[in-house]
Amino acid sequence: GTLSALAPHGASVRVAPLMADGRDKWVESSSLWPGSETWEPLPGVIHHDRVLAVAAARIEVSLADFAASLRGEGRLPPLYADGASNLERSFDFLAQHVPQPPAVGQSLSFRRVDLWLGGRTLSTLHFDNYENLFVQLVGHKEFVLCPPGDTSRLVDGRLRKAYATWIADDAGSGHFERTEEGGSAEAVMNYAAYDIDGPPAKYAAAAAKLHRVIVRVGPGEVLYIPFGWWHQVRAVPAENGLCASAAAFYEPFFCRLQPKSMTCPGPLLVNPKYKELCRRLKLDESDSEGDGRA
């Protein structure tokens, strides 16, 4: 009710449809996708027999439909406002109600604030190319964290993204469908090559060696997720069914050089944008973890 009351009349928002269990992405066999054998090979992809499946590309819906989804009602699947500059593009009417970025990040180069609004969601293990000060607003988020040093145990070449399509039917509901056109030209290296909670035999030994830390973040708490830290995120909504978070993103202190042809992340290097900060803090650039372990 509050969300609708704050929005202008007739507002629409861009959100991600999710599977019934709240998943947004997962690794699966490319053979499940029609016409996948005709897809053009992509640089950096080693295993052409698998894809990073995405529940569906983001869709534009009315704010009323989004609010109904948060209540578990309506004709649409679970919907998730999952970042991607959405505070600027879809939820600008909430900007004055979102807390300012935490002061602890004032030495970093600020990029933007994103919102995460949904119900019972599950974001698969990945890392971001930003520094992230993650603020929990409503409900709880449970994080499984793995340090950058685990990257070699999680990456096995790039993963091609394949987008399912949400198809509405005449009965007022709909279904997800894999199509030949869903195979994209995107190949990413920031998602785990397997499900860490149920790894295939090939990856079982690597999964057993992961340095996992589980953190639960509640309303008013802030979690710092540095660049390159892997995180899997499960939402635990409040009694009203809502789980709401905000993330303040900053330019990464470290960066990697990784052309599209690379099959594993490059070494961590100090971001040249922080050269003055390093000088002020008397940090030597040789402190970079040249082999990627951190």
Image (cartoon, rainbow, N blue to C red):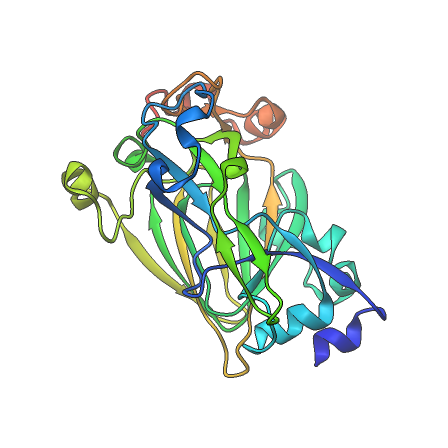
The answer to whether 103 appears left or right of 179 in the picture is right
Q: Decide: is 168 above or below 257.
A: below
- Residue 142 or 52: which is nearer the viewer? 52
- Residue 117 or 10: which is nearer the viewer? 10
Residue 186: x %, y % from top left: 52, 30
* Residue located 51% across and 27% down the image: 282
Residue 30: x %, y % from top left: 36, 36
Residue 104: x %, y % from top left: 58, 51
Q: Decide: is 268 above or below 130.
A: above
Quadrant containing the C terminus in the rendered view: top left
- Residue 88 or 290: which is nearer the viewer? 88
Residue 17: x %, y % from top left: 55, 58
> Does the rendering let one see residue 246?
no
Question: How many marks on residues?
Answer: 0
* Residue located 31% across and 27% down the image: 47
Q: Decide: is 256 above or below 125.
A: above
Q: Which residue lies furthest to the front in this view?
A: 170
The image quarter containing residue 110 is top right
Quadrant containing the N terminus in the rendered view: bottom right
- Residue 165 or 123: which is nearer the viewer? 165
The answer to whether 2 appears left or right of 235 in the picture is right
Q: Which residue lies furthest to the right in this view?
A: 9
* Residue located 54% across and 65% down the image: 77
* Residue located 41% across and 43% down the image: 126
> Does the rendering let one see residue 193?
yes
